[in-house]
Image (cartoon, grey):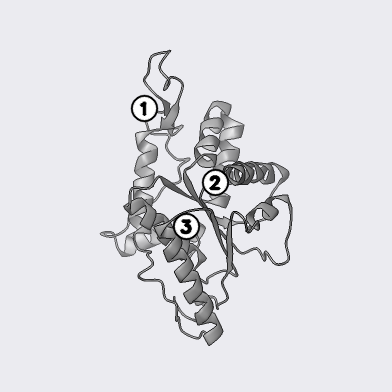
């Protein structure tokens, strides 16, 4: 299963191969042609000064357009096409994949608490996360999917370029009713990046907001203030997926 980073990088190549099914997904940061938000991706509500909605920041149409393009591509991934018996896997691997599948299926029906999938790359963590996200969106749920490294780049750029743009972006992610964080902990975070992630995790932990996380971290060995919240059994469950990388042994 590709990470979202791989998907974004390979979209142009795949688009050329199959132009009827796929469209190029641009990064949210490349919205500079929009005359409505002037490239920020955000606009203020048109409300009177005493209206409760006054001062509220909402996504611009151009940002929503990017989201729709992502949803079009994500539709290729579902629980129905998740393979619990890929080639060259052992009985132990198949049991692990089957368990992860059942947990994902149950969570997509009732998204309560936190759900974390972890394990090595290429074993289907992102596939399951996208499947949960798409299932929730199909039911009209207010869910958000973010690829953590790209999210941190976006926040860092908006923080450096325009402080007014940073705050609504950060709050929009932090306060999402259901949030999927893909590829958590895949890099050595700077102090600033760790602080932003810690704020998101702590905010959602304290409010028990539904959150799905995928990570290549070994949660059996790695511990810090942020991970301790993810590991709390009172708020959710952590599923270790044991399988082989489909890139090396055959496609999932």
Question: How far across and how far down the image is residue 75, in percent?
Answer: 34, 59
Q: Which residue is mark 3?
A: 9
Q: Which residue is mark 1?
A: 36
Mark 2 nearby-residue class (10 Å; few <14, some 14–19, many ≥20) = some
Instruction: Please name the residue shown 45% across and 70% down the image.
Output: 102
Instruction: Please name the residue shown 51% across and 84% down the image.
Output: 89
Mark 1 nearby-residue class (10 Å; few <14, some 14–19, many ≥20) = few
Mark closest to the chain's N terminus, 1 or 2: 1
132 in relation to 176, above or below:
below
171 in relation to 232, above or below:
above
Instruction: Please name the residue shown 56% across and 72% down the image.
Output: 241
Q: Which residue is mark 2?
A: 151
Q: Nearer the viewer, mark 2 or mark 3?
A: 2
In the rendered image, the residue lying farthest to the left is: 20
210 in relation to 167, above or below:
below
Label 2 SS:
helix
Q: Is residue 24 visible?
A: no
Give me the C-alpha separation between circle 1 and circle 3: 28 Å
- Residue 207 position by quadrant: top right
């Amino acid at each position: 299963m590709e990470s979202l980073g791989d998907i974004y990088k390979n979209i142009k190549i795949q688009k050329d191969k199959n132009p009827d099914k796929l469209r190029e997904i641009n990064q949210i940061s490349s919205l500079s042609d929009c005359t409505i938000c002037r490239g920020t991706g955000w606009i203020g509500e048109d409300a009177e000064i005493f209206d409760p909605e006054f001062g509220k920041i909402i996504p611009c149409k151009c940002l929503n357009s990017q989201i729709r393009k992502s949803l079009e591509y994500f539709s290729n991934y579902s629980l129905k096409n998740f393979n619990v018996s890929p080639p060259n896997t052992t009985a132990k691997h198949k049991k692990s994949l089957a368990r992860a599948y059942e947990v994902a299926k149950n969570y997509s029906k009732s998204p309560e608490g936190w759900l974390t999938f972890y394990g090595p790359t290429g074993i289907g963590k992102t596939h399951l996360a996208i499947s949960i996200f798409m299932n929730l969106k199909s039911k009209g749920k207010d869910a958000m999917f973010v690829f953590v490294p790209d999210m941190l780049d976006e926040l860092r750029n908006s923080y450096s370029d325009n402080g007014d743009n940073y705050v609504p972006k950060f709050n929009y992610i932090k306060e999402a009713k259901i949030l999927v964080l893909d590829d958590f902990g895949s890099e050595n975070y700077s102090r600033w990046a760790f602080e932003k992630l810690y704020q998101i995790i702590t905010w959602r932990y304290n409010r028990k907001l539904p959150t799905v996380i995928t990570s290549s971290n070994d949660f059996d060995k790695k511990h810090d203030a942020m991970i301790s919240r993810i590991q709390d059994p009172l708020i959710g469950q952590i599923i270790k997926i044991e399988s082989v990388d489909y890139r090396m042994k055959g496609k999932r």
